[in-house]
Amino acid sequence: MSDLNQIDLRALAVGNKRTWDQFVLASTALINAVVRRSLSTYRLSEEDVMDAAQDVYVRLCANDYRLLKTYDPARAGLSTWLAVVARSSAIDHARRRRQSTTPIDDVPETALAVEDRHVEKLKIPEGLLTERQTLILKYLYDEERDVAEIAQLLKIDAQTVRSTHHKALLRLREHFKEESS
């Protein structure tokens, strides 16, 4: 079995087949373990778990290895970075699998009725969030866009959208926790 630290990342990022094969061999155990652990609460079949692991590799080489090219060895070890990517990809896979598949024609009209009521918007103090955080919250909640769409629109990685969203929510929780004290 190959060691991840011996993989030539430049050759991998340009699509060298031999390097890719070595990378897959070296990373399979890690990615399968992370995916299996990440999906343990979702009660998915073994086939779904293996599909989710395959999704990790698809995500890594999609768009001319765009995600793989974002790896920065100064920020994290390759195995740590791969574990984060695998976990994120696995959760995305599980969320896609859980989507309802009931045809719209089979749903009673009363179940589709949307209550028309005024919802007061949260007043966020100016300067509490960065411009990017504010924009991502607007896209997610006001325009109800999904993470992939926002990432494409802003020309950033989907993980960056998730991370920015998470950081914005932490700031908001901290601010409103202090305000209510």
Image: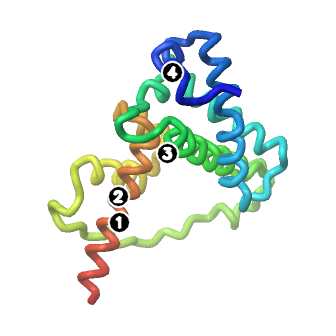
Residue furthest toward the left?
127
Local SS, label 4: helix
Local SS, label 2: helix
> CA separation, marks 4 and 3?
22 Å
> CA separation, marks 3 and 2?
17 Å
As drawn, the label of residue 170 is 1
**Residue 100 horizontal side relative to residue 79, left or right:** right
Q: If you read the primary sequence from the N terminus, does the residue marked by circle 4 or circle 1 appear first?
A: 4
**Residue at the disc numbered 2:** 167
Q: If you read the primary sequence from the N terminus, does the residue marked by circle 2 or circle 4 appear first?
A: 4
Q: Name the mark nearer the viewer: 4 or 3.
A: 4
**Residue 155 horizontal side relative to residue 52, left or right:** left
Task: Tell me if residue 65 can be seen.
Answer: yes
In the rendered image, residue 119, in percent from the top left (x then y), is placed at 39, 71
**Residue at the disc numbered 4:** 65
Q: If you read the primary sequence from the N terminus, does the residue marked by circle 3 or circle 1 appear first?
A: 3
> CA separation, marks 1 and 2?
5 Å
**Residue 94 horizontal side relative to residue 177, left or right:** right
Task: Tell me if residue 153 can be seen.
Answer: no
Q: Name the mark nearer the viewer: 3 or 2.
A: 2
Q: Which amino acid is tagged 3?
A: Asp
| Mark 4 neighbour class, 10 Å CA radius: few under 14, some 14 to 19, many 20 or more | some
